[in-house]
Amino acid sequence: MKKIGLFLAALLFVVIVTVSPAKAAYLPEYDKYIEVSYEDARYIADALGLINIPLGEQTAQKSFEVQENAIKLIENRLGTEIDHYYIWLTVNGEPVLGIDPPLPML
């Protein structure tokens, strides 16, 4: 019985040392691209507080960077990593706005 207990303790130690927790991060493979009209993109951008900011590839990149920085700030504060992806609004195939949808963390 003592040998079984020692074996299980050793096995538990090996599992704890070798198994690393899964890393959370930006998961681009889950990104969604949605083709919308310019008017719809403008309406959504305005609703998000981007009133009178021209929409285009630079706006999409900037919205991505701002949200990535916000996520990094939250992760640093909470000491955890958060899986996330983006919804990219496109007009004529060109991304004009990146939106990181909130996901409930239960």
Image (tube, helix red, strand yellow):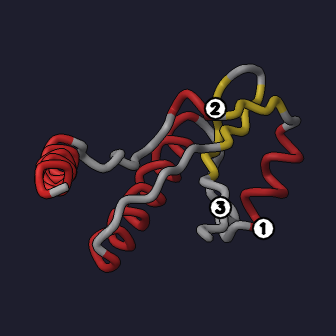
Instruction: State yes or no: discs 1 and 2 in contact (Cβ < 8 Å).
Output: no
Identify the secondary structure beneath mark 3: loop
Secondary-structure class at tag 2? strand
Q: What residue do we see at 35% from left, 68% from top?
A: 75
Kindly identify the residue that appears in the image at 61 percent across and 33 percent down: 30
What amino acid does circle 3 point to?
Leu
Residue at image position (65%, 61%) is: 103
Label 2 crowding class (10 Å Cα cut-off): few <14, some 14-19, many 20+?
many
Along the polypeptide, which appears first: circle 3 or circle 2?
2
Q: Amino acid at mark 2?
A: Pro
Q: Which residue is mark 1?
A: 47
* Mark linked to residue 95: 2
Residue at the image point whose x is 66% and y is 38% from the top: 88
Residue on which the image places disc 3? 103
Vertical side of 91 occupied by 67: above or below: below
Instruction: Locate residue 92, reporting x and y percent.
Output: 77, 21
